[in-house]
Image (cartoon, grey):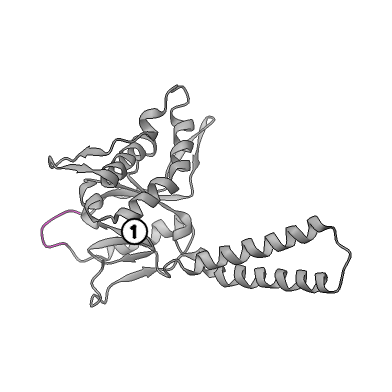
Amino acid sequence: MPRPHDDRIVYVHPFTRAYAVFFCCFGVAIFAVTMFLWLTNTALAPAAYGLLWLASAVLFLLGCAKLIEPPISLAITPQEITYLHRRGSWQLRWENILRYGVPTIQQGLGHESLPYLGFRVRDIEPVIIAITPRLAVYLLREQRHLLATALRSEKPHLNDFTPYYEVPDRFLGNSGTTYYGVQAMFAKRCEHFRELLGYDLVLSATTLDRDLEEFIGWLQTLERSRQPVSNGDTESNNE
């Protein structure tokens, strides 16, 4: 986690969280209108009432789900980028970043951009050491659809996708350290993303506070404003 006394921390507030109160209020409004119609014996089909009750519940629960998410999704300092989630966090030091950008997939004769921010790293080990197990499990499940999209696009003639879905629970890092369990599974998923998309780590655009391309430009500005690191490491080369 970033040091609290570091006055150079920049926080990113996810844009989608701004809609949380709206969803809650809209859900309550639909519930109130439906209750009024029901109490006044307004002639509506039972199915219509059912849909209205369902819509109000879904909107309210969606708003509540957004409200319990941390108000900050990224904390950026001159030393590192920290991703924050209610299930945990991971950290990525600037000198460990090779590049960042928007992943793309083959679409006909061209490429289609995906709604994600990708990071290609020099060494995934510091990330898998820092990531909390609950967050690793969540990301493995939440990003399965992205893996499926990448496989359909980049490996259309592959008949067996088993190696990509039945991820082994053992991973040998570059340092010679063997990782087990969810750490190993997360590391292998990052390896698959690097193969298919060119990036090890991916963040959904919903965790950002602005358009992807605008965010990347802003991130580059933050990187250029960093103080030179004392150990002589060079800064990353970005897209």
Give coordinates of residue 25: x percent, y percent.
Answer: 63, 73
Magenta stretch prevailing secondary structure: loop
Q: Is residue 135 above or below residue 184?
A: below
Q: Is residue 207 visible?
A: yes
Q: Residue at x 33, y 70 (%)?
A: 10
As drawn, the residue found furthest toward the right would be 43
User: What type is the residue that disc 1 sits on?
Assistant: Gln
Residue annotated with mark 1? 220
Give coordinates of residue 185: x percent, y percent.
Answer: 30, 42
Give coordinates of residue 42: x percent, y percent.
Answer: 87, 68
Determine whether the residue tagged by mark 1 lies in a helix, strand or loop: helix
Q: What is the span of residues highlighted in magenta in the rendered image?
A: 229-234
* 198 left or right of 53 in image: left
Along the line of sight, the residue nearer the viewer: 82 or 28 = 28
Q: Residue at x 35, y 29 (%)?
A: 163
Q: Is residue 239 visible?
A: no
Q: Is residue 41 above or below residue 120?
A: below
Q: Residue at x 42, y 46 (%)?
A: 141
Q: Is residue 176 magenta?
A: no
Picture quadrant where residue 132 is located: bottom left
Q: Is residue 115 above or below residue 77?
A: above
Along the line of sight, the residue nearer the viewer: 23 or 203 = 23
Along the line of sight, the residue nearer the viewer: 25 or 50 = 50
* 149 left or right of 125 in image: right
Q: Is residue 150 above or below residue 135?
A: above
Q: Residue at x 29, y 35 (%)?
A: 168
